[in-house]
């Protein structure tokens, strides 16, 4: 099986290499737009923290510019261009765009698998955006981004990984040369300067690139039901942790700071919860022996679970904790540089 995966990985790599070469030679065309385009992406499948870092950028830019965030809307049930509004669901636009829309209702959030078409539709609005953030579009080279911000996971070094399907790489590590900014995410908060230099060497940082390191922190507990009470979980309480994300282990570890009594239910990334899943969650919650007990989920899962039909007494005990990335150093310098670039390049 390993040999078979290796063969498919070589074939996949050949196809990706030919495609990138066609873009590099100008045979396949990249479209430029008269508006700053910032791309946030990676070269691996899932789990690098794109959405929290995108939200960090949105929060830094939205008070100064009309911001739009354009995504493909992974696993949505619709097609074509969709602009988020107050009636949008995860099925309409995808869970991550819906999460961003709910957190930042003052910006434009849209979905289109064809990013060129999506940008054209945004620019045709009565009040077009002044900057567009492309979510997970590093491989979508039909759009020429002004700045490429690429995330790599500290816990899964890309230098030691392999191309799909043998490993998790969408492209070879050499593709990182297209990045303007590289952010190593999920680092230990006490990452030493020596370790940072080792990463810089391994990633072969070029003179035109900047390297940053971020760690994962968590915000305040939020109720699934708007206006609900926020609990203070005691060390003797029980928590059922329900996740449908790529890497739930760090989130579960955070919940252990509240109580050691954690029961986990893990579903696939972007999982669409069914009626049977809801019954399973309710049964698992009822079997928790502690009198004080809660259901915790991730923010991304919360936008899918909030429309599911839970018994009201269960829904009132459901919560999530937002992920908040924090740069180990130079966060303000990074955000100011991005903001200044957008200001200077208004067309």
Image (spheres, rainbow, N blue to C red):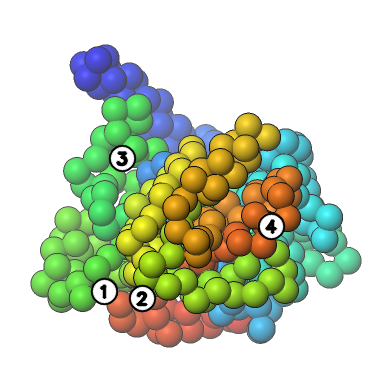
Q: Nearer the viewer, residue 331 or 182?
A: 331
Residue indicated by mark 3: 172
Q: Earlier in the sequence, mark 3 or mark 1?
A: 3
How dense is the environment of label 4, judged by Cα within 10 Å: few (below 14), some, or many (20 and up)?
few
4 or 2: mark nearer the eye: 4
For the residues labelled 4 and 3, the Cα–Cα distance comes to: 49 Å
Q: Secondary structure at mark 1?
A: loop
Residue 326 location (% of width, % of height): 39, 75
Q: Earlier in the sequence, mark 4 or mark 2?
A: 4
Q: Is residue 308 left or right of residue 215?
A: right
Residue indicated by mark 4: 313
Q: Earlier in the sequence, mark 1 or mark 2?
A: 1
* The quadrant where residue 16 appears: top left
Residue indicated by mark 2: 327
Q: Secondary structure at mark 2?
A: strand
Is residue 208 at all visible to an observer of this figure? no
1 or 2: mark nearer the eye: 1
């Amino acid at each position: 099986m390993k040999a078979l995966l290796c063969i498919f990985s070589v074939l996949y790599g050949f196809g990706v290499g030919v495609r990138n070469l066609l873009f590099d030679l100008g045979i396949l065309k990249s479209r430029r737009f008269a508006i700053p385009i910032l791309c946030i992406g990676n070269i691996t499948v899932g789990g690098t923290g794109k959405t929290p870092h995108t939200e960090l950028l949105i929060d830094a830019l939205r008070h100064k510019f009309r911001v739009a965030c354009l995504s493909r809307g992974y696993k949505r049930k619709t097609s074509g261009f969709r602009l988020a509004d107050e009636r949008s669901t995860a099925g309409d636009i995808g869970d991550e765009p819906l999460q961003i829309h709910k957190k930042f209702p003052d910006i434009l959030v849209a979905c289109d698998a064809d990013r060129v078409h999506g940008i054209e539709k945004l620019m045709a609005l009565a009040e077009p955006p002044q900057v567009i953030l492309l979510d997970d579009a590093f491989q979508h080279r039909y759009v020429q981004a002004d700045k490429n911000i690429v995330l790599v996971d500290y816990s899964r070094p890309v230098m030691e990984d392999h191309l799909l399907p043998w490993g998790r790489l969408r492209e070879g590590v050499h593709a990182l040369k297209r990045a303007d900014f590289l952010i190593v995410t999920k680092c230990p908060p006490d990452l030493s300067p020596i370790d940072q230099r080792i990463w810089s060497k391994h990633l072969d940082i070029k003179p035109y690139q900047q390297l940053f390191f971020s760690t994962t922190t968590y915000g305040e507990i939020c109720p699934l039901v708007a206006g609900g009470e926020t609990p203070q979980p005691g060390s003797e309480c029980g928590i059922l942790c329900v996740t449908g994300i790529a890497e739930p282990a760090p989130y579960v570890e955070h919940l252990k700071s509240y109580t050691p009594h954690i029961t986990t239910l893990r579903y696939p990334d972007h999982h669409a919860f069914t009626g049977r899943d809801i019954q399973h969650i309710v049964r698992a919650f009822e079997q928790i022996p502690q009198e004080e007990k809660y259901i915790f989920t991730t923010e991304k899962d919360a936008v899918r679970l909030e429309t599911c039909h839970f018994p009201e007494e269960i829904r009132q005990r459901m919560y999530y904790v937002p992920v908040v990335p924090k740069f180990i150093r130079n966060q303000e310098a990074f955000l100011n540089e991005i903001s200044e670039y957008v200001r200077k390049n208004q067309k």
